[in-house]
Image (cartoon, rainbow, N blue to C red):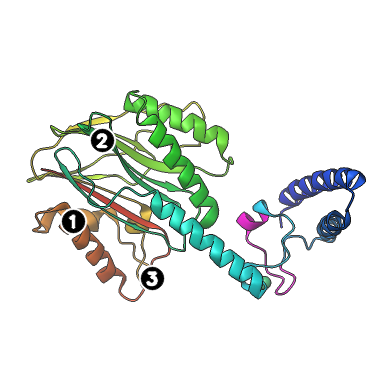
Amino acid sequence: MATQIESMFAERLSERKRRLEDVVSRSDNPDDIRQLLQDVDRALDKIGKGTYGLCEKCSEPIEMDRLNVDPLLRYCLDHLSASEQRALESDLNLARDIQTGLLPKKGIALPGWQSAFHYEPLGPVSGDYCDIILNEAQDSFFFIVGDVTGKGVAASILMSQLHAMFRTLAQSGFPLSEIMGRANRIFCEASLSTHFATLVCGLATQNGNVEICNAGHCYPIVVRKNSIETVSSTGLPLGVACDSKFTTTALTLGRNDRIVVYTDGLSESTDKTGEQYGEARLKTLLRTSQVSFASEVLTTSLGDLRNFLGNVKGDDDLTVLVLQKE
Ligand SMILES: [Zn+2]
């Protein structure tokens, strides 16, 4: 483990030790705390020996996102005791249910638009964010697809933070660029400097006007009857720099025009030869497929990805959102 990380954990553990010693001196029943103190000493001892962060069973590194949450961990995920495994499984199932509850409703009624989305975590929980938020007057709505760095539990916690932020900011009445600026500042201040989120946020009105901001995310694809275009990125991902500015792109969509927003779990899926699915293949598919509804666009796109991958399983969270003007 890198020395810098070791000294970070040494600092955290020493702080924990000081606090525990303080509590022990004031406690009537200090046995449990003494046990914890022993655990902290054992971890500090390992740092001294250079074995901190390694599983006591297999000597492989313990997962860093787990160590960050509990620096006293002694075993990697593969070597948890049966009761620890059951507890973890039950926590993850609960986390999955909570995260599923944060998704927009399937078939949500939108003013002048159809929507369809697919949200597929790689593990029990996802670092992808997908949301549709109707404004109060119900004549426009925000749509958001984002991707937090990393996967698993740590990423899913940040995903739920994005969800809470955008749910609040969407009702603020601020212009889209201002909403993105504020979301970025909050995300910067509240998350680890190693974590950021690429994200597309759009505001669509009943009459087909769409404003889109792309913060370092895969390019959304706009499909019209005789043309296809992408919305390139105009800002840094959220969480990279606190004072980032965001600009937006304005579009007008006519009847049956579509917007497809997705995460790199689609475009960067890799088949057994190492080839990536890619934006170009998706664009060709979207230009040529003869379908009428948003839900069909979604099904066709996912079907094409499955055909491309064959037996290979995806290795990232996957989200695809399709909006079609009625
Ligand atoms: Zn192990």
Q: With 279 as the anchor, is 19 left or right in this view?
A: right
Q: Is residue 260 something one can see in this rendering?
A: yes
Q: Nearer the viewer, mark 2 or mark 3?
A: 2
The C terminus sits in image quarter: top left
Element on which disc 1 rests: helix
Extent of the magenta region: 55-67
**Residue designated by label 1:** 295
**Residue designated by label 2:** 141
**Residue designated by label 3:** 313
Residue 214 part of the magenta segment: no
Q: With 267 as the anchor, is 260 left or right in this view?
A: left
Tag 1: Cα neighbours inside 10 Å, few (<14), some, or many (≥20)? many
Question: In the rendered structure, are the residues bearing label 1 and label 3 in contact, judged by CB atoms less than 8 Å apart?
Answer: no
Image point (54%, 44%), residue name: 195
Q: Is mark 2 within 8 Å of ligand 1?
A: no
Element on which disc 3 rests: loop
Name which of mark 2 and mark 3 comes first in the sequence.
2
Q: With 280 as the anchor, is 70 left or right in this view?
A: right
